[in-house]
Image (tube, coloured by chain):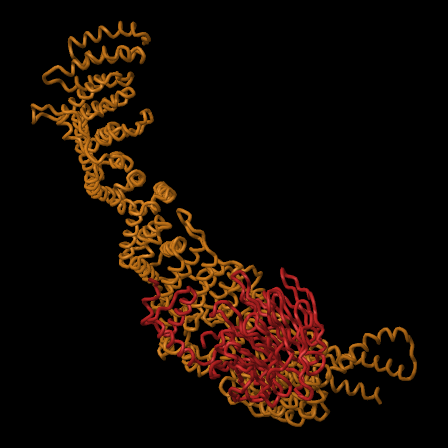
Amino acid sequence: MHPWNSTVGSASLKLMLKLLARLFQRRILIEDSMKSKVASLLTVLMALPPPDPQFVLRGTSAPVHTLHFSCGGPEPDIPLLFSGSENGFIHVWNLKTHRVDTALDGHGRKSVYCVETMGGKDRLLSQGRDQRICLWDLAEGRTSVTDSVFTEHMGFCRCSLLKVAQGRWLMAMAARSLEEVQILELPSKTSVCTLKPEVGAKLGMPMCLKLWQLSCGSQPVLLAGYEDGSVVLWNVSMGKALSQLSCHQEPVMSLDFDSEKAKGISGSSEKVLSIWCLNEQQNLQVYKTHELVNAGISDITIRPDKKILATAGWDHRIRIFSWKKLKPLAVLDYHTATVHCVSFSDHSSPWDRLLAAGSKDQRISVWSIYAQT
Amino acid sequence: MAVFDTPQAAFGALRPVCVQLTRAQTVENVRQLQAHLAGVSGAALQELQEYVLFPLRFALRVPGPKQERLVQSLVQCISSVLAATCVKKQELLQELFSELCTCLAPPPSSVKAAPLSEELKLAVIQALHTLMHSAYGDVILSLYRPSSLPLLGFAVSLLLTLAEQEKAKQIKISALECLQVLVLQCDCQEHRQLDEDEEQQCGDLFASFLPGISITLSRVIAGDIKQGHKPTVSAIRLFYLIVGLVMADKQLARIPKSKEKLPVEHSRISELMIHRGSDWTKSTAEKLSLLLHKVVESSSVHPHWKVRLELVELVHHLLRNCSQSLVDSFSHLLKAVVGLVNDENSEVQSRCNKVLQGIAEQRIVAQNRALADVLSENLHSLATALPRLMNSQDDMGKVSTLSLLLGYLKLLGPKINIVLNSVSHLQRLSKALVQVLELDVTDVKIVEARRSEPPGPLQQGVQKGRCQKKYFRFFTEEKVFQLLQQVCRVLGYYGNLYLLVDHFMGLYSESGLYRKQAAMILNELVMGAAGVGVDFLQEREVPLNVDDLKGSITSILDEYMDQANWYLVTSVDTEESSPEQSEQHLGLAVRAGGASSSILLQSSEPPVTTRTMNSNIWQICIQLEGVGCFAAVLGKEFRLLLLSALYPVLEKAGDRTLLISETALGTLADICEACGYDSVQCLINENSDYLVNSISLNLRQLAYQPRASQVLDTMLRNSDASLLPLIEDVIQDVLSALDQSYNSQASTFLRVLHSVMTALVQWFGMPSAEEHQQRHSDKGQSRARSQGQHKVTMTSQEVEQFFLDYVSQKRIAEGDLPDLEEEEADEIPLAKPEPSSDTEGEAPMPSHAQLARDVMERCIHLLSDGSLRVRLKVLDVLELCVTMLHPHGNHLLPMAHRVWPALVTRLISDDPLAVLRAFKVLCTLAQTCGDFLRQRFSKDVLSKLTSSLLSQAPASARAGPVYSHTLAFKLQLALLQGLGSLCERLDMGESDLNKVADACLIYLSAKQPVKLQEAAQRLCQVDQSLFEKLSVLAPVLL
């Protein structure tokens, strides 16, 4: 018998919380009889005031624009967090020591606003305001740019990456001419197609992109948010717009899409979050909208397990919602300036998972919010 | 005397004597024979052995009573023959043996006859002894056939009777030695080694005597101490030899199931023979166990060390040979040997250790489950009795009890886990340890001892962290504590760390009563697990897994540094804390997680006794020591844990309770050493990012976490300017938090701001201030600044310099340029700094200056705070801000403008203390904004100050010596000292100077206190020099 079991009945709340963590750590299965206790514990937890960040990463010395975790590796691998900041550096944070392992300088001191890993943590893609997308080789301590794509795009639209096969990626990025989106295949850099809206559509510049496919091998599809507040669904292989939905009055700042539920969410500079769904006829429909207290959303991310989502607000706050009903769960208040980006970690064990937010106040706050869901 | 080498010659010499003896058996004749024997060589005598022995034996066999002296001399003579020869015939051996035995036996006829003389007995015993040694090769074995069992038994019983009942020590010893030879366990090396079968046979044979021998011997051993140690030692040796032989595991294993059938003619003998089957073994072992218990009890406390040494040997021998058959006795035996580890005699000690080592090395315990059970049973009963024993025994008794406990644990070695896996064992053991380790928390001094203020720099504390001396309730002896430490470490070394840590963590959180002890034990367990300072007998089987250790340490650290366990009430200090202290604690308690923090809630209830606080202090210290231990154990690996551990430790380093801060400093030193940092400063510097993280998170709840400011303070004092980019945002956080709560938390925040500004001034203030001064002096202004009075004497040179400069400038203006090139070379470096100072306003301010400005802004609001203490603090901070903004006039002036009204109020109508500080700020301000202040100063303040000086003068003139300690005096002094340089710096007009001079003149009076006079004198000098300057310059300028 585990020595702790006997104490569970009478243990006070805090002891039980500790116990829970221990049980999780030791991979001890929680019996059915205990499940109700666990559930009641969790409700108590949710009633507590929102917590402080688990830790805060300092030292980028510039506003942080993008974050990307790489924690999925097996045990000896150190969990990493990549951050791109306004001074053109990509910092590689070691999440064990909470310190910068390396600082990558490849965008001529121009703001980096998108960082993605390609496969493992050794290959990195970064996009900067110098109108370049760089591919990095970070294996064995190297820090070299292996390849780069010149986008000629002047906006802030982040590119979107989709793995289509082993070693093959599709990348959607805003192209040179104002309204176009270009799809490239990586690493060959061959252009797959260019998505041009119909003449006279007046969508404006693309603001955010999300490339996805229903299942591996099926048709890749692109969701793009435009300057005029509309979201357009593109069939990539046919190069044709499937559906268009105008969700916002203002430019779409960020969107994310859950392909399982065929539901997506977008935010703009307004006070509204818009949730839309994709029906069987491949038509986008407004599902519902959610009113916010303060205007301005700079980033939206649905957690990989599709249970909750996080928004980065211009009001300096991070908000957590349940994805199913969009019930507000928590407001994480730490930053003192606009939050630019939010990102969930890809730890293999759920209780290690983290949320990170980068802000204009040059700090990256890292939160452990697993217990809140 | 001639030596007869050949048998013939010897025969010739011996024959007459032998014949003579055969004819007449007298003592005289025997003596003659013996005398002749001496002249015969061994080889020759061997030939004539039987011939010579014949008359002697004949004489013994003669029926009828004999003279004792004759028998004695006969036996001695036989003995001397046997000593020189060896017996080669079985018959001869048996006959001689029985004849000699008969001599010892009391004559059957005369029951009441006088007992045999002691000399005779001794002679016979020695003869037997010699006989046994002279038996040649296998011949001796003929004695050990079943058929000779009666004879042997006779001899054994005779000898035993002698050993037990004789008074003479010599006889006892000889009898015992003889017995030893008889059971073929002689100490001398001459004997042939028996092979297994022969041994087995002897074993069977001796089994018959075992009851008799063992009972008698145990009586001898437990007998009167007056018999001396030698018989006891021999008896013990014989005891273990015979038991070891009969009960040997090796032999018993080979015993067939059923008894061997002997030939018919031996049927009576076969009844005597014993079959060492399992039943017999069991019952014998039971009986032996009783005897052994008796033996151990009497001899382990025997005053003579050789007896105790022999006891150790006994345990050793039996454990080696009979670990299975006698398993039940081992609880006594092991207890004895483990207890003797701390014997006063070093020889016994070392032998004990060696034996234990041997036991451990041969894995006797590890391979023998039954033995392990015995040990764990012993352990259990000892653990049960431990608290009682600790309560009742004296220190020596405690030492022996604990060394017994330690010995058991060491012996169990890797088998400890058997014990630990049993819930009741573990609970007994842990409860016992926890009870024994109870601290004495009645000492009031611990609570009273405060750290002296202000705290010195951390480097002073960098000495290896020693454990604080603890005071226990149940013992005072240091040795006892060391033993307990060893007990815990051995547990940690062999035991399952997860299990132990879990268990003791359970105790830790179970009750406040156990918490300190459990923490102490946990610390030692970890040390033990890492193998630090463990004194063990055998290596553990599984090497340490560093990840496991790290996991355990992490969870212990989490528990230690949990709010409810780390932030305890250690003082009822009202000086340091704001009135809301108790409220804060309640708030903290609520934050710490609702219902569970009942302990904390209790502790913050109004009557916090000294006892509780003392206990809390100790708990924190023990936990701090634990952190030090963990660092030492993990070495550089601990660096990863610094993330969570460094901040709390630093926090405690700033604690006001002396004991805590000292311990924390020790811990810091330990961490430095373990993680490879050169100094505490280095540690703080390199981990400032971790600290900043914790500080910033804690500052968010500054109301509940007043200590965050202490850590920030410590960190600032121990770091350098490189820290600034890291803490910048933290300070901004503080400022914005302050904006939220001006009323309630101002004093807490101000402390933070004060330390921040102090650090900034230290890092950035000095060089730029000098630079600034430089620039000003270039412009020809007075160099005399704060050191005004020293520079007064320089005034004439200064004026001269000024004049020379003036002349040269004038010449240049007139177009007379003497050395153009030289001039240019001079001018270039001069010109360079100019643009930079001109563009200062437009260039972005360095961040430290920005911070200073932000802080200053808050100060403006707080200057009129209701509480005097806050106002004083604000004035201090304000002064630092002004110093900081010195080089940035463009920013300082607008701020100064905004500060001015509030500052004036402080100068004019406030508590004297505030006036004093405000005046200091004014002086600092005057260093930079001369022109800016001139008008305002003369308009708003000067008249007020001078009038206060004037009005106070009569009072001070009348006052006695105590006056110099009053506030009014200090204010006067400060004004008199400060006004001069202030006027100088502000370049005041004549009318203002007159006012100052008027005020100062009164103080030149001899009635005024001396210090005031001196200050006034200096002030006058300054004034005078100003006047002089004016008067000197006036004509030149004109």
Can residue B957 be seen at all in this image of the molecule? no
Q: Image quarter for residue B92?
A: top left
On screen, residue B478 versus residue B197, left or right, reads: right
Q: Image quarter for residue A99?
A: bottom right
Q: Quadrant of the C terminus of chain B?
A: bottom right
Q: What hue does chain A carry in this figure?
A: red
Q: Image quarter for residue B249?
A: top left
Give the chain ID for the orange colour: B
> Where is residue B616 shown, x and y percent of the image?
39, 70
> Where is residue B1032 shown, x and y percent of the image?
80, 85
Q: Which of A187 and B698 lies nearest the eye of the viewer?
A: A187
Seen in the picture, residue B272 relative to B775 is either above or below; the reply is above
On screen, residue A116 versus residue B149, left or right, reads: right
Can residue B34 be seen at all in this image of the molecule? yes
Seen in the picture, residue B513 relative to B57 is either above or below; the reply is below
Seen in the picture, residue A7 relative to B814 is either above or below; the reply is above
On screen, residue B926 versus residue B540, left or right, reads: right
Q: Which of B984 and B600 lies nearest the eye of the viewer?
A: B600
Q: Residue furthest bottom?
A: B939
Q: Which of B420 and B178 lies nearest the eye of the viewer?
A: B420
Seen in the picture, residue B737 relative to B388 is either above or below; the reply is below
> Where is residue B873 shown, x and y percent of the image?
55, 82
